[in-house]
Amino acid sequence: MTSLTRNRRTLIVAGLAFLALAPGCATDGGSSSAVDDATTFEALGSATRADDSIGKYLSDLSTSMNAWMQKTMNATTKRERSKQGLLEINIRERVRRRQSDILLELETGPIKNRTIAAAAIGFCQDPAVLSPLLAALGDGNDKVVSNALLGLTVLGLPETPLEEISELIIYAEEPKTRWSASNCARSLIEAGAPGEPVLSAARAGLTDVLEPMVRTQCALILARMEDAGSIDALSLLLFDEAPIVASSAARSLCYIGRRVDTARGAAARALVTAMAESNRERRLLIHPSLVELAGRNHEFDMEAWSRWVARLP
């Protein structure tokens, strides 16, 4: 993990090798399976007419956004990534075509329309929609709030204030909303937003017992902030019952250890200890991060790893 993200797409999809996309582009518009063939872009490109009713316009966008999320998560070949990129461009242009109407639905429309509009409006890449999206975080409907967080993630502006998002990480009643908030905060920090407003919320999020994805995202936030003060807490997550959490904790310890000289020994000891006390499955999960931090590979020879870590300050 020489970096926690490598490009803007990874910011948006939250590092899908070990995370999950923020929940809930509303599925009222149709199943992504209907747009999963080679004609996806052609079909969706002409599906939405500028003179359609706003309800149909949003429904078509919902179908496209669900397809985009599926392709974002599953694209592994150059061809698939190309289709994904074309689909995103298509969505962006369709949102821009009726940006004012979509904003109006976000602010005053029925729940179904607000839900779709909250996710869609971020695709326009216009800083002018930041304020309406932030206002949508106060919507009384959890789905609207979660999709507003997705919209902010896609918009990706480093000037996005993080205070309200941080509050949602801790206090949102719905686990999926806390997950969306922590994902959004992580993405925005990686896009350049200052992380200080999120620090205490991320530390608290490591103990979110109901939603492992919050623990995962918060571990990555603390890594990005090079928070050596969280090493002890991250060390405990190496034993988390959810492998995705343990993996993120291992990668976060590696990241901090490689960037904070005074934390390298503590991060290394945490990884070696977890390797020694874990079963083979968990060792396989931790091992790559330990190798990257150490710059060497003792495979699963715990005596060799113990000798190495004993020499660290």
Image: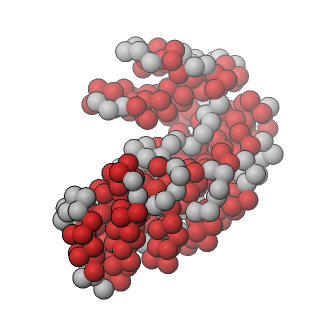
- Residue 92 visible to the viewer: yes
- Which residue is at 55% across, 34% downward? 96
Q: Is residue 204 left or right of residue 47?
A: right
Q: Is residue 302 left or right of residue 72?
A: left
User: As rendered, which of 43 and 69 lies closer to the eye?
Assistant: 69
User: As rendered, which of 251 and 57 lies closer to the eye?
Assistant: 251
Residue 289 location in percent, x, y?
A: 32, 60
Please identify the quadrant where the C terminus is shown.
Answer: bottom left
- Which residue is at 33% across, 72% downward? 268
Q: Quadrant of residue 283?
A: bottom left
Q: Is residue 11 above or below residue 199?
A: above
User: As rendered, which of 281 and 237 lies closer to the eye?
Assistant: 281
Q: Is residue 144 above or below residue 28?
A: below
- Residue 158 visible to the viewer: no
Q: Is residue 252 above or below residue 306?
A: above
Please identify the quadrant where the N terminus is shown.
Answer: bottom left
Residue 181 location in percent, x, y?
A: 62, 53
